[in-house]
Image (spheres, helix red, strand yellow):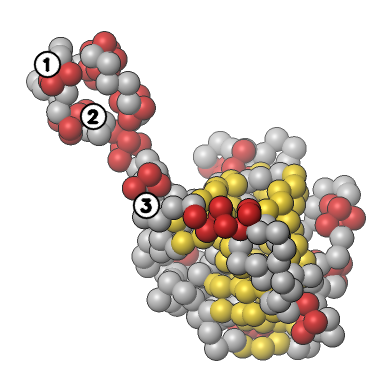
Amino acid sequence: MQKSDLSPTLIRGDTDQMAPGLSRRSFFMAAGAAGVGTAALLLDPREARAQSTDWTQPGNNNHVIDLQAAESFADGAVSIDYYGHCALKITSPGGASILFDPWRDDPSGAWGLWFKSKFPETAVDITMSTHTHFDHDAIDRPVSTMVLDRMVGNFEFADLKITGFADKHACLAPGWYKWTDALAEFGAEACPPNNVGHMDMVTYLVETGGVRTLIWGDNRPDPGPGFWESVGRVDVLTLPVDGSQHILSYDQGNAIIEQLKPKVIIPTHYLNETTTYTLSTLQTADEWVKGQKSFKLLDSASLSLAAADIAGMDREFLYFGSNTLTA
């Protein structure tokens, strides 16, 4: 077989369109002999079609180059933009941006249709995911210069510092829908120490502009030894609590808040009519939020928090509701 015998369709990995009589194994062997050398040929055709398209994205890393060359950064507010579910973008006073947990529908189809559209191709400097569940790991969708997927340890860039703490996903569903029972049906253990790998979790502490923000992800309510001490002071806390109590119950969420005593709480992982279908089994966070001592229903998907402005706050709930930047 000559290189010219490999059509563009076959190079993309669509081996279901191979010439009659040419086996899948023979095709791959022949392709290798022909010097094609593309990774797509080593994948199942369905996997090949689903590979990242990052290399086709517009833009470049000029913004990151400018940030790394900056000698100083002025004090100012930290911006938080909400994209629905657990997806938040934090922008430092100096302009460095991080997007956490972009979502997608489950590619296997096993968990049904959750989201009404694809995650937008948002321009951002850094993309991060707390864990590999489909509703947190569409890391190929943002137009991102850096991807720090499930990073543990410290990362410093421009005027921000990120610390990742390895822990575990909540493994006992507290609400009416016992989704964690489904893992046993797939032959997997949900709870540590022998949990399946996708139940591993990383929470992130972001420090910038004098504000310390803890991205909880879907972490368990009772983290491992030393967790609370390692995290230290938290000014802004995101928590996955909704009316169905899918990840954390009301009591579990409230207990975490009492432990950390943040100045601000931002609810996540709830039914958002802009982005999320009811097939997700989620509900809004309205009941939980409105049962708190102090809360504010935000009228947009963007929030600006300066350290001086939140210094006097005490466990203030700021709720994005159905406002998102994906509309």
Residue 21 is tagged as 1
| Mark closer to the chain start, 2 or 3 | 2
Considering the image in quadrants, where does the C terminus appear? bottom left
Q: Nearer the viewer, mark 1 or mark 3?
A: 3
Q: Splitting the image into 4 quarters, where does residue 255 fall?
A: bottom right
SS for callout 2: helix
Please provide percent x and percent y for residue 303: 61, 80
Between residues 76 and 24, which one lies in front from this camera angle? 76
Asked whether the viewer can see residue 246, the reply is no
Q: Nearer the viewer, mark 2 or mark 3?
A: 3
Residue 11 is tagged as 2
* Point 57% across, 57% down: residue: 66
Please provide percent x and percent y for residue 277: 42, 69
SS for callout 3: loop
Please provide percent x and percent y for residue 181: 59, 50
Residue 57 is tagged as 3
What number of labels is visible? 3
Please provide percent x and percent y for residue 320: 58, 80
Q: Residues within 10 Å of mark 1 (few under 14, many from 20)?
A: few
* Point 85% across, 73% down: residue: 261
* Point 46% across, 57% down: residue: 142
Please give left or right for residue 28 compared with residue 106 in the image.
Answer: left
Kind of residue sitting beneath label 2: Ile
Kind of residue sitting beneath label 3: Gln
Q: CA distance from mark 1 to mark 3?
A: 38 Å
Kind of residue sitting beneath label 1: Gly
| Mark closer to the chain start, 1 or 3 | 1
Please give left or right for residue 106 compared with residue 36 in the image.
Answer: right
Q: Residue furthest left?
A: 20
Vertically, is 313 above or below 36?
below
| Mark closer to the chain start, 2 or 1 | 2
Asked whether the viewer can see residue 258, the reply is yes
